[in-house]
Amino acid sequence: MKKQEKAIKEIVKKYGTTINLKSSPYLIAEIVRNYAHVFNPDAAFKRGVADDNPPGTPPVPHSLPGDPQDIYIEVAKISKSLQLLHKKLDKLSK
């Protein structure tokens, strides 16, 4: 929990207490990209290659880029991370 609280303080310090999505629509994506691992460490985002290959073997793709199922899964993970982040930010602003 301390890592999450520290991350929230960093986010508030760097981005402020209010995010204006009309003027900075990609800010949420940046925050999620930089802090999602803190709020959901089990949901390490795949980068398109397997992490468990034996040394000396070429990386094996998990799937083709743009696979709709993979995209849906990643969007669901991001959505959950955003919800958690929003709740934490709300608690800090009160």
Image (spheres, rainbow, N blue to C red):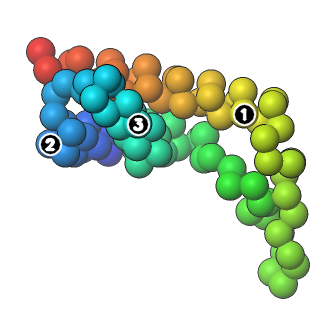
Q: Is residue 43 visible?
A: yes
Q: In the rendered image, which quarter is residue 1 located in?
A: top left
- Say which residue label 3 marks: 26
Q: Position of residue 69 (x, y in %)?
A: 81, 30
How far is mark 1 from mark 2, CA to CA? 31 Å
Q: Which mark is residue 13?
A: 2
Q: Residue 82 versus residue 24: which sits nearer the camera?
A: 24
Amino acid at circle 3: Tyr
Amino acid at circle 2: Lys
Q: Position of residue 75 (x, y in %)?
A: 62, 28
Name which of mark 1 and mark 2 comes first in the sequence: 2
Please give left or right for residue 78 compared with residue 4 in the image.
right
Element class at badge 3: loop
Q: Residue 59 versus residue 3: which sits nearer the camera?
A: 59
Element class at badge 1: helix
Please give left or right for residue 84 compared with residue 90 in the image.
right
